[in-house]
Image (cartoon, helix red, strand yellow):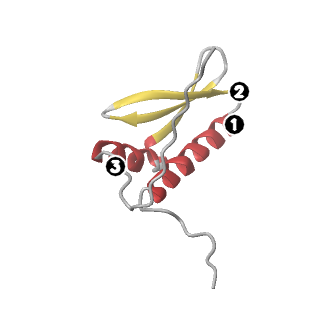
Amino acid sequence: MTFYYRTTTTTSGNQQVSEETKAFWQHASDKKNWRIVQLPNGYFQTELQWEDKWNDVTRRETVEGAEAAIDTSVNHYKNKLEFIQGPKVVKTFE
């Protein structure tokens, strides 16, 4: 079995992310667009409202686990928005 991996790296600010994708990331990075619902089997489902529709994202056993999943997702999308601004300098040398 052969696997093909492809990675790309850019050093410019705009990493060719579409405006629609940016809009989605901005929307998903706002916690007010999320909710938690309890399913008939007792699990809790996290949902994201996008385009006037609630979309299921994850399922967790506890409300605390579901909220932690939402917090992690919000941080994930915030990081994506931060990195399309360009590379983050972590150390410089004299």
In the drawing, what numbered circle is on residue 65?
A: 1
Quickly name the residue at label 2: 61
User: Is there CB contact under 8 Å for labels 1 and 2?
Assistant: yes
Local secondary structure at mark 2: loop
Q: Residue at x 44, y 62 (%)?
A: 86
Q: Which percent across, then down, holds residue 37?
A: 55, 28
Q: Amino acid at mark 1?
A: Gly
Q: Which percent across, then down, holds residue 47?
A: 49, 32
First of labels 3, 2 by sequence position = 3
User: Is there CB contact under 8 Å for labels 3 and 2?
Assistant: no
Q: Amino acid at mark 2?
A: Glu
Q: Which percent across, then down, holds residue 27?
A: 39, 46
Q: Quadrant of the C terminus?
A: bottom right
* Mark 1 crowd level (few <14, some 14–19, many ≥20, 10 Å Cα): some
Quickly name the residue at label 3: 16
Q: Quadrant of the N terminus?
A: top right
Residue 41 in which image quadrant: top right
